[in-house]
Image: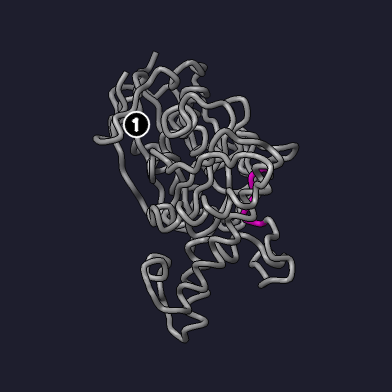
């Protein structure tokens, strides 16, 4: 049997791919741009070409392919992705190779990786919440990402935290993502301050009263959403990832304090940082690749050296 799989994490701007061995070693890792502006067919073709390139770089034929993609996903089809223009794209369209392919939702696939390899290792029930350009969560329940009845589970970014608040791009009002995503923090400050292109990290580190107000609203929105999630699903921990989590104590401390206050009759779950960073999606895709190959037992025995990055058995 082949000793590696192809793993690919497809984002709106870039794709991160690699080859991962049976022992969890990352044999190769590369990035390519996602040609979203060229249309959905071009993105599918680019993914297929990237998979072929990665497969040819390995020693032999890969055992399987794991793909982490955005939008509504089933194991064998990319059902809908607004950002990429996909509707009902079969998994087999993503590669010309005659090897098994398994698709996964990008955030839930990252949550799977954090569950087996990262910050959630050894935990059965937790929330993985990457906060980046947008916000979506992965509910890990009994050790596996929960997709819901139709694959839409995890859209915590569109929880209405301020029902009379600003309109979200999704059409609803007062969504968490509208206030607390990295893109929204920068956008809301820029609008109020009369500036352009301010990044979230600049807002977080600023002592400008407008920046303090915008950041306070983001923290308030997060604490509200996380309190609701905690009361509904009782996670053992909440794992925060994505670019905004790099704010460290400036994010974790005030959100933790407010979450504790909102949960008056019960303890708040610990907030901890994600361990896998930008590699979560690709590493999760490698787990899907081994599952596609009929080897679901691979992954739990791997040990990650967070300092150096590669996985070893």
State which quarter of the image contains the C terminus: top left
Check the image and report above or below for 7 versus 182.
Answer: above
* In-front residue for pair 175/294: 175
| Residue drawn at the location 51% of the way across and 18% of the way down | 296
| Residue drawn at the location 40% of the way across and 43% of the way down | 49
Check the image and report above or below for 142 versus 176.
Answer: above
Q: How far across and down, in percent of the image, does residue 97 sit?
A: 45, 31
* In-front residue for pair 265/156: 265
Judge from the rendering whether residue 223 lies leftward or rightward of residue 207; answer left or right: right
Magenta region includes residue 157: yes
Q: How far across and down, in percent of the image, does residue 68 sit?
A: 50, 40
Residue lying farthest bottom? 194
Helix, strand or loop under label 1: strand
What's the image's color scheme?
Answer: one colour
| Residue drawn at the location 56% of the way across and 39% of the way down | 269
* In-front residue for pair 5/178: 178
> Is residue 63 at least partly visible in the picture?
yes
Judge from the rendering whether residue 89 lies leftward or rightward of residue 38; answer left or right: right
Q: Residues within 10 Å of mark 1 (few under 14, many from 20)?
A: many
State which quarter of the image contains the N terminus: top left
Name the residue tied to disc 1.
19
Q: Which residues are magenta?
A: 153-158
């Amino acid at each position: 049997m082949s000793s590696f799989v192809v793993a690919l994490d497809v984002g709106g701007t870039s794709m991160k791919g690699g080859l991962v061995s049976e022992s969890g070693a990352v044999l190769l890792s590369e990035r390519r741009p996602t040609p979203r502006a060229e249309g959905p067919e071009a993105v599918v073709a680019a993914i297929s070409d990237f998979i072929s390139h990665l497969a040819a770089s390995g020693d032999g034929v890969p055992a399987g392919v794991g793909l982490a993609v955005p939008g509504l996903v089933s194991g064998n089809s990319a059902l809908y992705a607004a950002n990429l223009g996909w509707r009902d794209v079969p998994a087999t369209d993503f590669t010309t190779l005659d090897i098994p392919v398994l698709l996964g939702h990008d955030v839930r696939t990252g949550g799977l990786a954090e569950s087996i390899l990262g910050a959630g290792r050894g935990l059965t029930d937790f929330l993985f919440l990457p906060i980046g350009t947008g916000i979506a969560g992965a509910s890990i329940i009994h050790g596996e990402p929960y997709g819901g009845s139709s694959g839409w589970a995890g859209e915590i970014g569109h929880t209405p935290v301020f029902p009379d608040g600003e309109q979200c791009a999704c059409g609803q009002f007062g969504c968490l993502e509208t206030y607390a995503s990295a893109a929204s923090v920068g956008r809301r400050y820029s609008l109020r301050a009369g500036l352009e292109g301010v990044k979230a990290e600049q807002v977080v580190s600023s002592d400008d009263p407008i920046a303090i107000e915008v950041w306070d609203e983001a923290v308030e929105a997060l604490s509200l959403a996380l309190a609701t999630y905690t009361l509904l699903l009782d996670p053992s921990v909440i794992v925060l990832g994505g670019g905004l989590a790099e704010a460290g104590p400036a994010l974790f401390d005030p959100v933790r304090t407010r979450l504790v206050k909102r949960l008056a009759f019960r303890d708040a779950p610990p907030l901890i940082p994600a361990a896998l960073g930008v590699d979560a999606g690709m590493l999760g895709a490698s787990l899907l690749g081994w599952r596609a190959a009929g080897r679901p037992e691979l992954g739990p025995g791997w040990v990650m050296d967070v300092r150096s990055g590669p996985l070893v058995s």
